[in-house]
Image (cartoon, grey):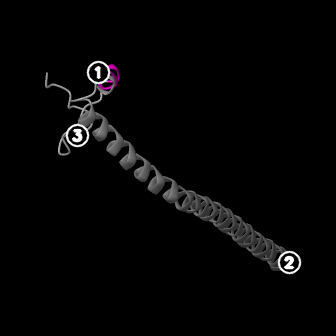
Amino acid sequence: MNATDSSTQPSESSATGIGLVLLALAMNLFFLFSALSYWSGLKNQIRQNNALAQQIAQSKPVAANARVVQGMLEGLANDLLVLSKSEGDAHRLVEKYQIRRMNPSAPAVPAAPAK
C-alpha cells in the first residue's frame, strides 16, 4: 500500500505544481494585458489633450482679432449714435436697426423676471 501511495503522490504534487505555475502565468499575462490596455488609453488621452491644446493656441489670435473688430464696431456705432442727433439718415439707421448704447455695467442679456 505504501508503494502505490508513494507512486501516486509525486504525480499529484507535480500536477498541482504545474497547475499553480500555469495559474501564475495566466495571472501575469492578464495583468500584462491590463497594463498595456491602460497605457494605450493613456497614450490616446495624451494625444487628444495635445490636439486640444493646439486648437486653443490656434484660436487665441482669432479671439484677439474678434475683440479688435468688436471695438471698431462699437466705435462706429457710437459715432452713428452721435451723428443721429443731427442727421436724418443716421437717425433712420439707428431706428431701423435699433442701435442703442449699452450700460457697461449691465449684462448684455437682461435677467429673467422672478416668478
User: Gap between marks 2 and 1, in whole Å?
Assistant: 108 Å
Residue that label 2 marks: 7
Locate residue 110 relative to residue 46 in the image: left or right.
left
Say which of 45 and 100 sits in front. 100
Location of the N terminus by quadrant is: bottom right
At a point 68% along the width and 62% down the height, the residue shown is: 37
Say which of 87 and 6 sits in front. 87
Q: Residues within 10 Å of mark 3 (few under 14, many from 20)?
A: few
Residue that label 1 marks: 95
Location of the C terminus by quadrant is: top left
Q: Secondary structure at mark 2?
A: helix
Locate residue 71 relative to residue 100 in the image: left or right.
right
In the figure, 99 relative to 15: above or below?
above
Q: Position of residue 50 (x, y in %)?
A: 59, 64
Say which of 6 and 19 sits in front. 19
Q: Mark 2 touching mark 1, by CB under 8 A?
A: no
Q: Quadrant of residue 16?
A: bottom right
Q: Mark 3 touching mark 1, by CB under 8 A?
A: no
User: Gap between marks 3 and 1, in whole Å?
Assistant: 22 Å
Number of dots carrying numbers: 3
